[in-house]
Amino acid sequence: MSADTQQLVVICEEIETYFANHPFIAVRPAKGDPPDQYEATYSIQGICKDDSGRLQVSSHHVVSIAIPSGFPHIPPRCRPLTPIFHPDFDPAAIRLGGFWNNARSLPELIIFIGSMISGELFSKEHAPNQDAAAWYLGNTEKLPFSRLLNRSDANPSASLSTERVAEPMEINAIEEAELLSDLSQISRVRTAESPTSQNDTSSTDHAETPGSDIDLATIWLLVGQKRFYQLRNILKNPAGTIFFDGKEEVADQIRTSIQAARQIYKEGEDLELRGLPAQALEKFTAVEQLVSDFPKIDEDIRRTEQAKELLGDWVQGKEDTSPQKTASPLGKTGANNKKQRAGTPLPVDRKPSRFFSSLQRINFVPVALFAGLLSVTVPPAYVYLSDTGRYDQALRLYSECTGHIHNRRFNEATEDCSAALKLAQDITIFNKQESNELTGKIDALLNSEDLRQGLAGNVLVNGAYFPQTLAETLNSIRKTMDEGDRLAAGAHWEKAIEMYRNGILKLEKEPQLDPSVLGDLKLKLHRVQSQLSIEKGIAAMQKKLWQQAIDHFDNASTQIQPLPPDEQKDIRASLQPQLDKSTFLLLKQQGDTLFASADWTGAFTSFQQAINLGVKLDQAEEITLNAIQTDIVRADLYATIKAGKVAFAKNEWNAAIEQFARASKILMDNPQLLDQEDAARNLRKLSRIMLQASIIRDQQQVEKRIAEKQYREAIKILHQIAGYIDRSPLKAEKEFAEIRRKVGETLATTREAQVISDKKTYLEEHFRAFFAENYPAALPESLTSPVITFIKEEEDKLLFKMQCTESGRGKPMNLIMYYSFAKTTGAWGFHSETAE
């Protein structure tokens, strides 16, 4: 469905009027009565591709323009009917970008598309036709192919129906020098005809005119519409310089038209004050024809039309503006008789004689009474009409003003309220009380907080005003939080977490908002994250994935830390038993796995920790033996311990550890072999021997790796030794505490050695680049034999001496320089060290 019928009729009249005599553009209806689809034919130069894909110049282009339902809020649908090679054209549609808004008209759009075809306007980014965009950007010197916007393209007499721009009433004429000064902003004329682009404009993101806030099509449309006040404001705008051909002619036309219109307007005002509304109407109509957007001219025309319709020219007779006045035929009879007596014959006029004779038959008393009655009644009637008209118009503007405020169009609201206030204040006699009340309402509205904040771009949100962008952000955050709360209430934890995170990201970008809102939202996020982790932990326990369950429960414990203490306590009361049970079962599982893989020390440690935790849970591990006689088991235990001691004496560490671990498992699996006290004591002894053997074995490997400068391997083994001690129940004993301290020291020095080794390797690999940077005369390929020496560490820097041989310029030279590495920043730098 297209636009309504009346609107289509108006559009058709605009197009017929505007393009009736256009030299380059022909527009014809294509569908509907009245038409809702048009075809525009452009006789201007553009380019297209032929069947072989080569670019060809064409001067015939046809575009289809369809008016949709919802016009002008929804833009027309435009598509090319002939091939056109342009970044914004594809066979299905023409991309208008940000050009269209509901203030645009169809003639403006048709002119705009013509400017695109001629190469004056095109998109530089995100164009539908990327091939065309690449060609246009690479051939800007060839653009435009023709120029459509540097002349008045429309029928000069055409006038499109658009909203008049309100401007304060100005009657005093502007001197020529003042207007030229206003137009000095555009004095820098662009002489080179370079193409414009559709990527940067204050009103759209589609059409760019260098240095201006309005496209040239609009300028020439306004010239054709004689909207010279709006044009003057555009040219006076200091925000940018407007370049276009014919600038001086337009400036002169604006100046002379406005001056002439003001003079005619004064004459109209004088005639209206003298009670001659018909003649005043003629003057005001002439003003509108000369300058269509003259301030309040439509109001003046409407008022004088009403007065003329009701009263006519209410003074006695119309003013004779001829230089000489004819004497009344009834006056100066004495003079006439005197001339007759002097012998000068009077010319005989039969018509006046008949007229005088009929006048003699008229009774002038009723005529005089009627004339007197008119002189008494007509002026009050005229004042009544004027006051009533002003009040009705002020009331209408006030209503529109309140509507604009409701729709957040605050500039329009200010204009309408200001105009309504002026009209209400101009009321002299009739509707005075109502006008005073209306004036108070308008004044209150003009000084209201809503309007003041709205003009500043602020919006009321939750009782406070914010800039519109911030208010939109705040409303968006509130919706996000509400949605998160709803999802959390339904236990949709992951979706709730996503909502809360989005809200936090938005709040963190707006530091001026109340920080408590951000704090509350973060607490909600921690709360749902902990619930999600607990839920996942319970699910992992059901699958006997003990490590995953522990990870989830640990994460839940971390997430609840920011919550209030009472809330933490309640959650931990249900969380901790689940965590302990999962840990106990994991240790038992790990012990079984480690023992099966011959990791005796690890298995022993896991079993011991599991037993301790099992006692705590009142779930002590029950170990059942398979009908093994106690003596055989005990003998096996002693034999195993003996084998371990033999291996230990021979420094066969792995064998010794294996035997002692096996003996420990026998004791743990057969607690009836010894009483509880003896079993615990023997297990502790076996644990000590296994730990000692493991430490000695690995320390030997560390020494070997350091000697071979295999620092990474040495560090790995040192971490392993530290792990043995940290996991052992014996770690608090003095012997192992001392060993652990030394392991830490060795680990630190080995790491330092690894860092130095890595840096030396790095310098050896990049020595040519460093020397070439600091010795510009040296060619990289002539540098050989690098020698890197670590000098010292000072503060957080490692200092290295770099040497190499340059052999490219005669006798080989030995080049030396110093480089430092900052450990805290990881940056290399030239060092001024000159002596080791």
Image: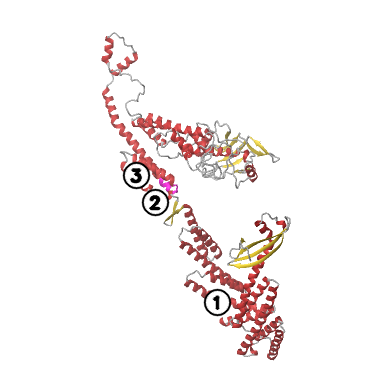
The residue carrying pointer 2 sits among few (fewer than 14), some (14 to 19) or many (20 or more) residues within 10 Å by Cα, namely few
Query: Which mark identifies residue 577?
Result: 1
Task: Classify the position of the N terminus by image quarter.
Answer: top right
Q: Main secondary structure of the magenta part?
A: helix
Q: Which residues are magenta?
A: 400-409
Q: Mark 2 and 3 residues: CB-CB less than 8 Å, in contact?
A: no
Which amino acid lies under the numbered mark 1 shown in the image of this protein? Answer: Pro
Q: Secondary structure at mark 3?
A: helix
Which amino acid lies under the numbered mark 2 shown in the image of this protein? Answer: Glu
Residue 733, compared with residue 516, is above or below; it is: below
- Residue 811, can we see it? yes
Q: How far is mark 2 from mark 3, CA to CA? A: 18 Å
Query: Which mark identifies residue 449?
Result: 2
Q: Mark 1 and 2 residues: CB-CB less than 8 Å, in contact?
A: no
Residue at the spot 36% in from the left edge and 40% down from the top edge: 423
Question: Does label 1 or label 2 sit earlier along the sequence?
Answer: 2
Residue 49: x %, y % from top left: 67, 40
Query: Which mark identifies residue 439?
Result: 3
Direction from residue 468 to residue 421 in the image, left or right: left
Where residue 134 sits, quadrant-wise, is: top right
Residue 493: x %, y % from top left: 54, 65
Q: Secondary structure at mark 2?
A: helix
Question: Does label 3 or label 1 sit earlier along the sequence?
Answer: 3
